[in-house]
Structures are given as structure tokens and as C-alpha cells.
Image (cartoon, rainbow, N blue to C red):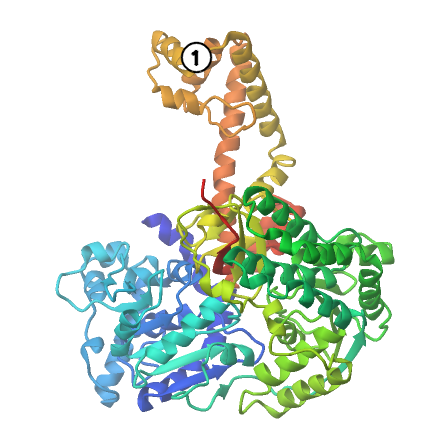
């Protein structure tokens, strides 16, 4: 445990933690009001994320005890929803044990002297303080995670509560003494039985920031409708759309508290492109008419067709858009696997998508409008460009770099930043913000989060109509917005109204950005069969089509690790590391390949030589794993046949190990028939073993780095070390990654064979 303290000590004054604390402090007064008056208070931090909500709960126990006088020193708190990143944050060593106890002792003494607040069991000595009193020499100097002091109790769908495991402190805690706890939902369905357990808590924190996925929004709305109106509850949102989509404004919620600096009205400009959009949209609607009512498979394919058609129309690519290629591959595979399912009814839809994919003039018009807006504005030093996806961002960066005659990496130095609409909001303001299309409510959020004085939208008539509908229904409908924000939102709607297509039904259009189809309602994340293709819907509103066996790396399932999970096995709440839309290799594999070409090159080449020789020797001698085992036994090295098998590469796969010791490594080489000198084999063993150790170490560091970037706790020192040890390309790769929460996994078809 000494290593935990030594590693954690610098974390106490971590810049990210301090910045997060300053953002959390204004919430204390709101919590006081909610608890005192037993209110449900929506809190809107306009276009500025409130970070580390889980830390707010643990701070009330360990860093700010007594700061909310109406709460006990060890309040019973609840957090909903509770994601893997929240668990990771509460598992990070951030609290000095003795300092945490000192804060509580001071708060306890103040309450006794001033006779303020109410006395309750939560004001007594908790069991962990008793452990600290008895074992101060062993524990007092340690820096521990919140989960060591507070039990993270998970409540299941049936209402059963599973107590959390408090590392280090829990095994020493006395029985039948007060145990601080925090109640969080277990993975799975949100039910009345689950919600009912939150009714007895002192305070519940509900984090609805950036929730755009249908399943998660419905879960939050159900939770808010079922939890007792007498439970003090604080709902945290960063966009007006968060409150609308999750039903957070419904009674008994009180007037929304807005946390933001004054927002000055800013100018908007709209550029209309692709004026044929309305006609082409009607053709698509005719082609899809009645198709989605024939079968569940056709319904889901029709929904994916609409997404693909929209993505193709909004593409900036010089080549055939990847989304169109992926959909055609999906349809071809479905026709082959499931004949007789009337999939031929999609032939007109496929033709229309193919025509859009070949319509390079439309993409060129949109791309040229974006580049002109970005490059011909001499009054702006910094420009933020919003595009549909990570792939579109990479393509536009290349186009802009070619126009300017510079390298892609030089765009940032020139003040030009291109991001996906699902990227984190910027920390610094931009002079100009350009949206290359309208991609749902996230587009409005990012336009305002950029804090740009000039905001430009490149839209077609249908996108303009959707944007007007969103601005009016999901933003302006929120009461008590600051005057500057409301004026800007209304001016946006008024600007786009003349460009908006008048004949479209605006209520049906948002389904193209967030899945509102009945197919999504019927989709089951837990499916019995084997799905050939899936559509993964994320909580931020983005989607991704993938084959069932595509691998994604998930945070939070295993502590301090990235776990590789097949697409078909992803479940709601998984936090997935995403690269560009066309990337199929998992993130860590790509990083390791990058490092293998640089600092690990010698060791990697040694391993490749070793594997090449093994394959050649086995082809010549035809030795089986069993035969190799017998020969090793004869040489005095007893190993299991499955262990030997793990050292042998297959014809296609290099994923194999080597013997753990030098002696067995040499014996293994001799059994295979290698005639290399021992000196060379010993050097090979050292290099291959070092490569394996380095790969494992990088994997652990990568998990920490991604968690740090996602949680806003990747400080400049860590970034500099990453650049020094991994190289600039690896740092760029990490910065390009984003973490998205799985909202649903929709299967297109299940294999019945």
C-alpha cells in the first residue's frame, strides 16, 4: 500500500482537480437550499460543463464536511446515472487520510460549539475514522480514493443493494459501526424498485449533461418521475436541451438556477447550399414509404438508410462517403444471408444513396462554402469549424492544408481547428465558429460553447428547418434563460427561417440525428443470437455501424484497464474509446503499432525474426505442441502442452508469447532445431521480453491517460511526458480519441443458423 501513497501524493494539488473544485463550489449554496426546503432544483451551467459530479459527492464527506449545514457530516447521497468514469474518479487516490479526518473533526467541533445544523447518526464518528485512530502509523499518511472511505453501494433492478468494497479501510473497520455510503444504480434496467431506494437519501445528484441518446434520456426521465418529490434533488445540465430531452423541467422541479457569466448577443450568418435538398428528400421518403412496416429487419434497415442518406448529403469528402459504402455492404450482406425477407424493397433507397454518393458537385459546393468562410475572414485569428464526424474532420483538415500549402499539423498554429460536433467543448474562445451543416442540438451547443463573436452556418433548406425547430423547442422553450442567450437563440431561428424548407414536417426531422424510431424502442441490447451487423447509438447522439465482431475498447469494466469488447457484447452505459469513424483497429493496438515503428523498433524486429524462424522450423519439422513438450521434458523443463501451444504462432496471427525464463527459451529454440549461438538467443530473449513488458506498461499508462483526458485531469506535465516518451504522433492520436457512452445496440439481423 506504500506504493499507492507514493504514486498518489502529487495528485492532491493536481491542476485538474483544483479547476474542478472551483466549478463545484457554487453548487454548495444550491444544495443547501435544496436540502433545507426539500426541493428539486435544475441547475444550468450554460455551455460550460460542470466537471467531476462524483467528486462533489465525495467532497461533501472528505473535503468540505459541514459546508452544507443542513446535511450531516456523512450524508447519504445518491448519484444518477452512474458511469464507469464516475467509478474511476472515485477510485483515484485523491484524499489524504489524516487531512480528511482533520477536516471532519474541525467541522464536528464547529457544530458542537455553534449548535448549528441537526444532529444525526451521520454526524457521529464513522468506522473509517475509528480505523484511522487505531492504525494511524499505517494509514494516516496514505492518500486514498474516496471509495476507501465511502462504500459505493449499488442498487439493482430488483431493489437489492450490494455493498461496495472499501479497499484498505474496509478490512479493518469495526462491525456494527456507522459506515458512510453512497447509493448508485447498478448496470441494467431502471425500475421502480431501484428508484424507490433513493427515496430515503439526504440528497440525490442527477447529471444530465450532454445526454442526447434516447435510452439514457428515457431512463433519466423515468427516474425523475418515480423518485419521491420530497427527496432533495439537484439536476445538473450544461445546455437547455439537456433539460428538455430528459424531462428535468417537469413538476415538481423549481425554477432553473442558471450558472453562467453574462452572454452578450453575437452575430450569426447563414450560407445556403444544396438547394435541391427538398426535392431529393421527397424522393427518399417515397422510396421508403411503407417499407419499414413490413418487418423488424426492414424497419431497422430503413432507419439506417435515413441516417446514411443524411450523412452522405452532409459529407465533405472528395471520395465516395464511407457511410454510403458501409450501408451498401450491409444491404449486400443482408440479401445474401436472409433471402425471402423482401429486402429487394430497398433497391430504390440504395439507388438514391448511390446517386448521392456520386454527386461530387454537391459536396464540393458545401466544402467550398466552408473553406471560403474559414480562409477569407481576415478579421479572425482563430477559427473553429464543426463537422459531422471525426472522419469528416480529418478530411477537411487535409483539404484546408492543401489549399493553404501547409502540413496538416500546422493548421493549429495558424489558428484553424476542425472538430467533430461530438467533440468536447473548447476551453478557450474563438473569434469565429463555422458549422459545416446542422447535425442536431449538439451543433447549437458547440456554436455557443465556442464563445465566438461571429458564428456561421453552412446549411441546406432541410437542415435549416431542423435547426429552427430545435432552437425554438429545445432551447428557447426553457424558461428563465438569460436575456443574452435567449436573444441570440431567437436571432438564430429568425436568421434561418427564410432559408428553411416550408414543406417539411419539422417534428419528424430530428430522428435523423437522434434515434427516435420504433426500431430503437424494440432494440434489445441483450440478444440471444449472433448479429451480423449492429448500429451502436451513443448518449451524445452519434451512431456507428459496425460488424458484430468489431472490437471496441471500453473504460471502467476493469479498473485501470482498457478492455476489448466485441460490438455485439457492448451494453448500455459502456464507455467506449473512439477514433475516426473508419477505424477498425482498437485504440491501444494502433498506438502500440506506432510505438513499434519508433522507440520499440529493435525489439519489434527481433520478435518478428523469432516468429519467422519458428514458422519455418515447424513447417520443416512438422513438430506438434505435444512433441515439443516431450522433448522439453527430456531436457528437464516440465511444461504443460497448452503453455507450449501459447508460444506457437498461427499462420495468420502473431499473438503468442515466449517462455518466461531464459533457460526454457534456449531449450525451446533447440527443440525447434535453431542453430543460432546462445549469445544471440539470449539477446533475443531480453529484447522480446522487454517488448512484452513495455506493451503491458504502455497499456496501463494509456488507460490512465485516456481517463485523465476524459475527466479533464490531464495536466501539462503529463502531456509533456507523453510527448517525450510516446512521440508527437502518439500524443496526436490520444488527443484525437474521444470517449462515448453506449446508449443502445441495435441489431440489424440475427443469425438463425
Q: Is residue 239 visible?
A: no
Q: Is residue 473 visible?
A: yes
Q: Quadrant of the C terminus?
A: top left
Residue 4 placed where, x, y %? Answer: 36, 51
Q: Which of the pair 430/100 is nearer the observer?
A: 430
Q: Is residue 638 left or right of residue 496?
A: left
Residue 158 placed where, x, y %? Answer: 26, 64
Q: Is residue 268 left or right of residue 298?
A: right
To which residue does mark 1 refer? 667
Residue 514 placed where, x, y %? Answer: 57, 68
Tell me what residue is drawn at x 73 percent, y 58 percent: 352
740 in relation to 477, above or below: above
| Image quadrant where residue 660 sits | top left
Q: Is residue 564 left or right of residue 310?
A: left
Q: Which of the pair 428/165 is nearer the observer?
A: 165
Query: Circle 1: is it few (<14), some (14-19), or many (20+) Cα within 10 Å?
Result: some
Q: Which of the pair 59/156 is nearer the observer?
A: 156
Query: At numbered mark 1, what does the secondary structure look like: helix, strand or loop?
Result: helix
| Image quadrant where residue 39 sits | bottom left
Amino acid at each position: 500500500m506504500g506504493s499507492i501513497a507514493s504514486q498518489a501524493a502529487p495528485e492532491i494539488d493536481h491542476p485538474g482537480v483544483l479547476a474542478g473544485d472551483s466549478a463545484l463550489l457554487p453548487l454548495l449554496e444550491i444544495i443547501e437550499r435544496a436540502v433545507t426546503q426539500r426541493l428539486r432544483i435544475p441547475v444550468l451551467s450554460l455551455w460550460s460543463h460542470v466537471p467531476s459530479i462524483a467528486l462533489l459527492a465525495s467532497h461533501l464527506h472528505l473535503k468540505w464536511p459541514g459546508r452544507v449545514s443542513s446535511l450531516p457530516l456523512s450524508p447519504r447521497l445518491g448519484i444518477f446515472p452512474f458511469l464507469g468514469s464516475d467509478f474511476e474518479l472515485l477510485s483515484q487516490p485523491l484524499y489524504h487520510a489524516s487531512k480528511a479526518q482533520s477536516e471532519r473533526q474541525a467541522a464536528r467541533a464547529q457544530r458542537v460549539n455553534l449548535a448549528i445544523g441537526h444532529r444525526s447518526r451521520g454526524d457521529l464518528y464513522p468506522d473509517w475514522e475509528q480505523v484511522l485512530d487505531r492504525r494511524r502509523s499505517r494509514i494516516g499518511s496514505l492518500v486514498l480514493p474516496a471509495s476507501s472511505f465511502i462504500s459505493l453501494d449499488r442498487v439493482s433492478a430488483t431493489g437489492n443493494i450490494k455493498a461496495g468494497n472499501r479497499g484498505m479501510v474496509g478490512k479493518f473497520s469495526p462491525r456494527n459501526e456507522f459506515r458512510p455510503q453512497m447509493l448508485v444504480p447498478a448496470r441494467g434496467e431502471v425500475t421502480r424498485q431501484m428508484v424507490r431506494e433513493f427515496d430515503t437519501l439526504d440528497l440525490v445528484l442527477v447529471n444530465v449533461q450532454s445526454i442526447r441518446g434516447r435510452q439514457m434520456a428515457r431512463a433519466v426521465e423515468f427516474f425523475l418521475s418515480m423518485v419521491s418529490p420530497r427527496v432533495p434533488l439537484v439536476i445538473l445540465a450544461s445546455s437547455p436541451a439537456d433539460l428538455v430531452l430528459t424531462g428535468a423541467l417537469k413538476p415538481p422541479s423549481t425554477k432553473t438556477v442558471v450558472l453562467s457569466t453574462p452572454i452578450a448577443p453575437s452575430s450569426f450568418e447563414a450560407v445556403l447550399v444544396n438547394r435541391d435538398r427538398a426535392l431529393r428528400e421527397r424522393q427518399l421518403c417515397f422510396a421508403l414509404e411503407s417499407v419499414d412496416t413490413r418487418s423488424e429487419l426492414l424497419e431497422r434497415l430503413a432507419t439506417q438508410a435515413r441516417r446514411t442518406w443524411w450523412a452522405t448529403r452532409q459529407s465533405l469528402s472528395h471520395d465516395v462517403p464511407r457511410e454510403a459504402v458501409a450501408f451498401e455492404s450491409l444491404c449486400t450482406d443482408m440479401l445474401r444471408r436472409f433471402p425471402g425477407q423482401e429486402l429487394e424493397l430497398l433497391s430504390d433507397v440504395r439507388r438514391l444513396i448511390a446517386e448521392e454518393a456520386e454527386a461530387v458537385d454537391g459536396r464540393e459546393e458545401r466544402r467550398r462554402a466552408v473553406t471560403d468562410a474559414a480562409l477569407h475572414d481576415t478579421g479572425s485569428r482563430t477559427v473553429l469549424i464543426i463537422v459531422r464526424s471525426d472522419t469528416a474532420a480529418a478530411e477537411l483538415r487535409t483539404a484546408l492544408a492543401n489549399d493553404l500549402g501547409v502540413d496538416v499539423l500546422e493548421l493549429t498554429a495558424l489558428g484553424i481547428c476542425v472538430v467533430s460536433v461530438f467533440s468536447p467543448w473548447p476551453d478557450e474562445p474563438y473569434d469565429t465558429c463555422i458549422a459545416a451543416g446542422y447535425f442536431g442540438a449538439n451543433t447549437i451547443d458547440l456554436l455557443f460553447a465556442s464563445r465566438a463573436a461571429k458564428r456561421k452556418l453552412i446549411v441546406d433548406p432541410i437542415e435549416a428547418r431542423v435547426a429552427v425547430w430545435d432552437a425554438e423547442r429545445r432551447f428557447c422553450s426553457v424558461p428563465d434563460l438569460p436575456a443574452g442567450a435567449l436573444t441570440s437563440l431567437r436571432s438564430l431561428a429568425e436568421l434561418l427561417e427564410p432559408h428553411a424548407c416550408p414543406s417539411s414536417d419539422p417534428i419528424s426531422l430530428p430522428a435523423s440525428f437522434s434515434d427516435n424510431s420504433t426500431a430503437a424502442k424494440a432494440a434489445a441490447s441483450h440478444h440471444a443470437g449472433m448479429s451480423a451487423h449492429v448500429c451502436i447509438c451513443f448518449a451524445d447522439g452519434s451512431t456507428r455501424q459496425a460488424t458484430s465482431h468489431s472490437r471496441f475498447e471500453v473504460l471502467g469494466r476493469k479498473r485501470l484497464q482498457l478492455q476489448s469488447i466485441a460490438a455485439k457484447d457492448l451494453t448500455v452505459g459502456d464507455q467506449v474509446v473512439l477514433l475516426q469513424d473508419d477505424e477498425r483497429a482498437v485504440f491501444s493496438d494502433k498506438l502500440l503499432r506506432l510505438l513499434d515503428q519508433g522507440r520499440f523498433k529493435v525489439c519489434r524486429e527481433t520478435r518478428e525474426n523469432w516468429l519467422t524462424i519458428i514458422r519455418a522450423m515447424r513447417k520443416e519439422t512438422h513438430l506438434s505442441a505435444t512433441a515439443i513438450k516431450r522433448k522439453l521434458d527430456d531436457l528437464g523443463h516440465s511444461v504443460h502442452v497448452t503453455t507450449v501451444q501459447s508460444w506457437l504462432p498461427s499462420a495468420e496471427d502473431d499473438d503468442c508469447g515466449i517462455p518466461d525464463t531464459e533457460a526454457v527459451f534456449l531449450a525451446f529454440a533447440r527443440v525447434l532445431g535453431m542453430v543460432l549461438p546462445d549469445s544471440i538467443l539470449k539477446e533475443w530473449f531480453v529484447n522480446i521480453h522487454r517488448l512484452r513488458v513495455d506493451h503491458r506498461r504502455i497499456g496501463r499508462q494509456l488507460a490512465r491517460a485516456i481517463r485523465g483526458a476524459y475527466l479533464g485531469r490531464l495536466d501539462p506535465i503529463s502531456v509533456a511526458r507523453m510527448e517525450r516518451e510516446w512521440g508527437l504522433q502518439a500524443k496526436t492520436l490520444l488527443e484525437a480519441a474521444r470517449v462515448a457512452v453506449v446508449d443502445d445496440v441495435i441489431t440489424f439481423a440475427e443469425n438463425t443458423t
